[in-house]
Amino acid sequence: MKNNNIINQHLIKTFNMKAYILLSLLCIIAFSTSAQINYIDELMHAEKKHFTQKMNFKPSAFANTNDIFYHRINWKVDPAVNYIEGNVTSYFKILKDQTDAIYFDLSEPLTVDSVLHRTGKLSFTHTNSVIQVNFPTKLNINDVDSLTVFYKGAPKSEGGFSSFIIDKHNDVPVLWTLSEPYGAKDWWPCKQDLIDKIDSLDIFVTVPTGNKVGSNGVLISETTLNNKTTCHWKHKHPIVSYLVAIATTNYAAYSDFATIGDGKQVEILNYVYPENETLARTETKYTVDVLELYSKLFIPYPFADEKYGHAQFGWGGGMEHQTMSFMVNFSKDLIAHELAHQWYGDHVTCGSWEDIWINEGFATYLTGLTYEHLNPENWMNWKYKALENIINNAREGSVIVDDTTDIYRIFSGTLSYKKGSYVLHMLRNQIGDDAFYEGMNLLLTDESTSGGFASTKQVQEFFETAGDTNLTDFFDQMLYKQGYPVFKVEWLQNADQSVDIKLIQTPTHESVSCFKLHVPVLFRGEGKEKLISFHQTKNNQSYSFNPGFEVNKVIFDPELNIMAPHPSWTAINVQKNELASQLSIFPNPATDKLIIKTNKQSIAETIDIISVDGKNVYSFENNSHQRKMVVNISNFKPGVYFIRAIISGKEVTKQFIKD
Ligand SMILES: [Zn+2]
């Protein structure tokens, strides 16, 4: 899922950060200008209003008493009317002896007319959005049975976006569903959980003739009778209930084809608004490139025997319905993100909403990989933009969702999407490409998760197996704990050319005292350079190494592989920073007042204080040649700040912490 209702304050407030982070990177990043706009995806999922009504959903405690393996569904809808009428036949296997009832989730505005069983009508109750159907005789483990729930009603639309929506495009009615995370029960009786996938289903949707219906799987038939058209879709892969979806309007349809593996063709079926068809035909072609790329980097497209597709809708983003994503438009990033979910989110689904990063962090990172492979000149900038968002907004908060009743938190653009994606990028650089891709594929292919659900713990185990390493510290500090490290790299070169290095971290959040990481540092001399990765296991750790040449510049993490700020003065030559001793700041940490003092020999010509997210929060031109300045920092947000002073024309930098 990805929302495009972009409020781009982030871009405005961090613009000057771009200037200074790039000081250290100018030589290696080729910036183009307007080409970036397309992927500046500050998608903040500002859907709180939409979601508030859906909070506090807990799967029925009885969800585990049966395994739904097949649904045959008949729906009758008209995109002009907020109404649904239908029946859902469920085939299930009983998992517990002496089971006397089965439960489905269905919201109250919908009414159940009857429940049919081969023995006749079954008794049922429908309260608190749960249907309880009573069996005539108790069933035992491994018994297989089926029943059909007949229901109808006007799904409750809570204004704005919801799980069952009627809308218009170009004055033509359109209807779509979007059930993630808790909305499937708003329009059909199902088991709304992250426990049991439906192994296969047939969906029959009857609509006024002139409409097409997009849905999961393969379109088997479209038959018209008495001005009604019934579209039959068949899907034969395991699918979670929130990914079952329909969209209907007067779609124009066309297909592109991708080629994967040993020449296998995959149909990409596009249902687009007729007024957008010309543009869409150009834009959706990109799906071919991305589907082929993901199929090479990971296992081949998981639903290749059926199709991939898009159905246009009016929600402000995209939703990765299995084999047919619903899309507001066909921007490259939205295509890449929703398609990525077919591997991570659909084929393998997060096993709880706490673990949503397995859907969203992964899909966001795969979108990044489209830059690395299909648009390499903008790969550095993709990383830069993701980091910018994290540094601005993730000083606290964990990737693992601490409150799943707050749906805004589940779909936090910064924590679940951006930070989740950067954790994967860092992991790749900690364990290496081979182990990383092996772990990514184990998650898709291992029998415990393939076609099913995955927990963060399982993800960790797959990468540990692939990398033959222990990742407890990495997963703990990056996913469960909060914040990110701020680095200072102190270095000096000795007469024998050996270099002494000290890695100093100031994490933004107290939950981590030192992020244990392999930290890449680039040493550059005349015509020579060497990239060394230092394994930091404690704060203020020192290292020595001999590059074999005279070093004139040290660059912290030149490829942006560490989730941390990258200002040019992160690496400091302590020999050449002799002026630093002429500048003192105290107290440190400081609360209200910060005193900045130079010694008797020197005057600071200018002083700037820069926050960790790159904002210049204080500037002072010392025209009156003061030696001591008192800065009121009571309004500063707590965190790490940099002081940059110019003394005798040279830059001196220091850090302090505002409590
Ligand atoms: Zn998504």
Image: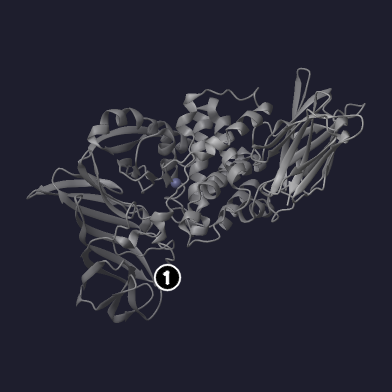
Q: How many marks on residues?
A: 1
Q: Which residue is drawn at 31% across and 61% down?
A: 186
Residue sitting at x 42%, y 70% = 64
Badge 1: residue crowd in 10 Å (few <14, some 14–19, many ≥20): some
Measuring from the top left, give residue 520's x and y in whole percent.
72, 36
Q: In this view, does 457 lie to the left or right of 135?
A: right
Q: Farthest residue toward the front?
A: 624
x%, y% of residue 254? 26, 34
Q: Position of residue 394 (x, y in %)?
A: 60, 48
Q: What residue type is labelled 1?
A: Asn
Q: Is residue 16 left or right of residue 232?
A: right
Q: Residue 317's image quarter?
A: top left
Spot occupied by residue 139 in the image (x, y as percentages of width and height)? 33, 78
Q: In which quarter of the image is residue 82?
A: bottom left
The residue nearer to you, when weighing 605 against 569, is: 605
Q: Is residue 330 visible?
A: yes
Q: Mark 1 points at which residue?
A: 64
Query: How does the figure colour the protein chain or chains?
Result: one colour
Above or below, 290 against 634 in this view is: above
User: For numbered disc 1, what is the local secondary structure?
Assistant: helix
Q: Say if disc 1 is inside 8 Å of ligand 1.
A: no
Judging depth in this view, the residue of 542 and 223 nearest the camera is 542
Is 307 placed left or right of 595 in the picture? left
Q: Which residue is drawn at 52% across and 61% down?
A: 403
| Quarter where residue 596 is shown | top right
Residue 449 visible in the shown view: no
Q: Which residue is drawn at 41% across and 59% down?
A: 52
Q: Nearer the viewer, residue 501 or 80?
A: 80
> Is residue 621 shown above or below 196?
above
